[in-house]
Image (cartoon, rainbow, N blue to C red):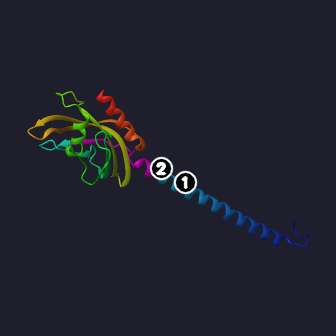
Amino acid sequence: MTDASETPAAKRRRLRWISLAEFIAVAGLVIAGASYWDSHRERERTDTARPASVPLLLTATANGSRATLTLKPARSDAVVQTQTLIFPTAVRADAVEITGDARLEAGWIEAGVRKAVPASGDAHPPRLPVGIVTVFVENGAMQRDAAVYYVGYTMHDRLLRGRAVALEGITLVRRTPETKLRAVVDARWAAALQ
């Protein structure tokens, strides 16, 4: 509402200030929108530059006596921090926790395999299911992987010390949630013994 006593020059001046205030408000909105768009585009560029996370695949190398398997990621850019190995309950009830030096030792399972597998001839399952939870760093980010692997092994007689387990290697069976690893490992071992 305008004052009737307002002069035309005062009215033009008032309208000019309103126009200037509106212009500043619109300019502020344009700048804020451009800033939002720029940050959104930058985030998109960062996301596309980062490679997608690929599930971890472990490989194994047996030492000369086949008493130890050295475990390592198939990809060289993944660095193992810790591992938890879960064996069938009949072979070893407790899990083995490893920091840094990823490996599987025959001594961890030898007594349990001797008890669980019949001593007659070579009638034993050639693979032992093992759940492996690996915490690793890849592309600067800490990640976690849980999977069931088969550990290939053979048994041979030793003079005066019973049968020994020799480790052959590992193969991926399936990815499994950590909370279900023990159950999957036990079920696979029970099926192998039948």
Is residue 174 at least partly visible in the picture? Answer: no
Instruction: Say few, some or many: other residues with alpha carbon within 10 Å of mark 1 (under 14 / 14 to 19 / 20 or more).
Output: few
Q: Provide the residue designation for mark 1.
A: 37
Q: What is the residue that sits farthest to the left in this orientation?
A: 159
117 displayed left or right of 89? left
The kind of residue on which mark 2 rests is: Glu
Residue at left offset 36%, top offset 33%: 187
Is there CB contact under 8 Å for labels 2 and 1?
no
Q: Which mark is residue 179?
A: none
- Camera-side residue: 12 or 180? 180
48 displayed left or right of 40? left
Q: Provide the residue designation for mark 2.
A: 44
The kind of residue on which mark 1 rests is: Trp
x, y percent for residue 161 = 12, 41
The image shows a total of numbered marks equal to 2
Q: What is the residue that sits farthest to the right in this orientation?
A: 4
Residue 50 magenta-highlighted: yes
- Camera-side residue: 57 or 37? 57
- Camera-side residue: 9 or 27? 27
x, y percent for residue 183 = 39, 38
* Magenta region, residue range: 44-60
x, y percent for residue 150 = 28, 36
Separation of disc 2 and disc 1 at Cα? 11 Å
Residue at left offset 35%, top offset 37%: 185
